[in-house]
Amino acid sequence: MNKKTKELNRINNSLDKQVNPENQEAFTDMICYLRGANISGYHQELVRHDLTEMVLSAQQRGENLRAVIGEDYQAFCDDVIASLPPATPKQKVIDFLDIACWSLSILGAINIVISNETITLIHDLIFGSFFGNPLNCSISVSIGGVVSIGIVITAAIIIVNVITRRAFQIGKQKGNDRLKAGLVGCGLMAAFLLIARLGQTILFTINIVLACVIVLALYSAHKVLSQLA
Amino acid sequence: MIPSQMLKGTLEGCILKVISHKETYGYEISEKLQEYGFTNISEGTIYPLLLRLERNGLVIVKHRESPVGPKRKYFSLSQSGREEMDCFYSNWVELENAVNALFKDGK
């Protein structure tokens, strides 16, 4: 998110609080649906700003969102999306790389922190001088670990995609949606357990300092890409 | 009530005409259109059209303070918007004449 978009996002977040509970659900559904649209982040925030102004003005007149938008919120959002320039292929590539770098930096950092070798290293750094243990600065990366990271990122992208595209349907049939969400959760859990059992083969080992440098480089790349998005 | 299918294509020209009177904002445009007999034209109906007019450079947008909180978008006509409005009206007159001639023919 570049500076201009971030500033607009900050303003919109504070204005959102003035939307009353009667309009909140439909308003959130519309913003959620727009988030999944093929338009730039800046246009998403611009539209969100305009919609917030429309809703707050309506509230002041004693009207609700339905009086302003009409019955079909999704059709309204589709009209809005069609009126805006679609995100360019360059923007899409930057967005994808931004998300990939950010996700990999977070998951990489988590994996470094929770790895057995890191815990042993911290232990040795504290007590090593007493027992004279040599420091092991390598952490091992297993096949399961790499596959798990891939699954986490792919599942997150798919889940966000489904939620944004079906913003107006999700939650309207509560039982059905909860069952589906439960099944997806169980499926993911089963996959992770299977991977943890079968994917223990070490793919490679890496120096912990180098691993930290890679994580920092990915995070820096995310910061740079988010300015371009 | 005018069917929405019939309104398509004419509403943009009418919005340009309303904006040509004075600098105005979405809700005021919808109110004005309703005064002229365009029933059921809400702010939500014209918002996507205003976005399109803005994208095509037919209107000039200025953000001004509003009593509600967020800045409100005010629209005025650009030179190309004025030309587009004139073009729409001459097309409309041509269409109106053709339809009237057909229906008044009596055959």
Image (cartoon, rainbow, N blue to C red):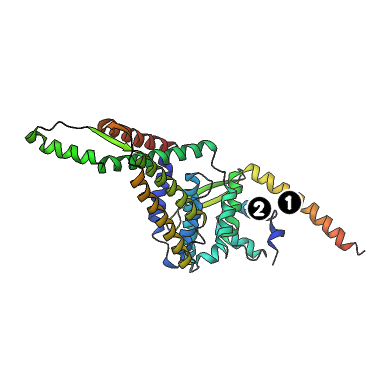
**Total of numbered circles in the picture?**
2
Callout 1, which amino acid?
Answer: Tyr
Outermost left residue: A130
Mark 1 to mark 2 CA distance (whole Å): 11 Å
Q: Is residue A188 above or below residue A57?
A: above
Q: Secondary structure at mark 2?
A: helix
Q: Nearer the viewer, residue A37 or A180?
A: A180
* Viewer-side label of 1, 2: 2
> Given the image, what chain letter belongs to the residue carrying mark 2?
B
Look at the image and tell me in which quarter the C terminus of chain A lies. top left
> B98 or A148, which lies in front?
A148
Q: Which residue is rendered at x = 60% and y = 56% of the image?
A: B46
Report the residue at 64% width, 42% height from top.
B79
Comparing A178 with B14, the one in front is A178
Whether residue B5 is visible, yes or no, is: yes
Which chain letter goes with mark 1?
A: B
Residue occupying the far right of the picture: B107
Give the residue displayed 52% in from the left and 35% down from the top.
A90
* The disc label shown at residue B12, or none: 2
Q: Earlier in the sequence, mark 1 or mark 2?
A: 2
In this rendering, does residue B64 appear at all? no
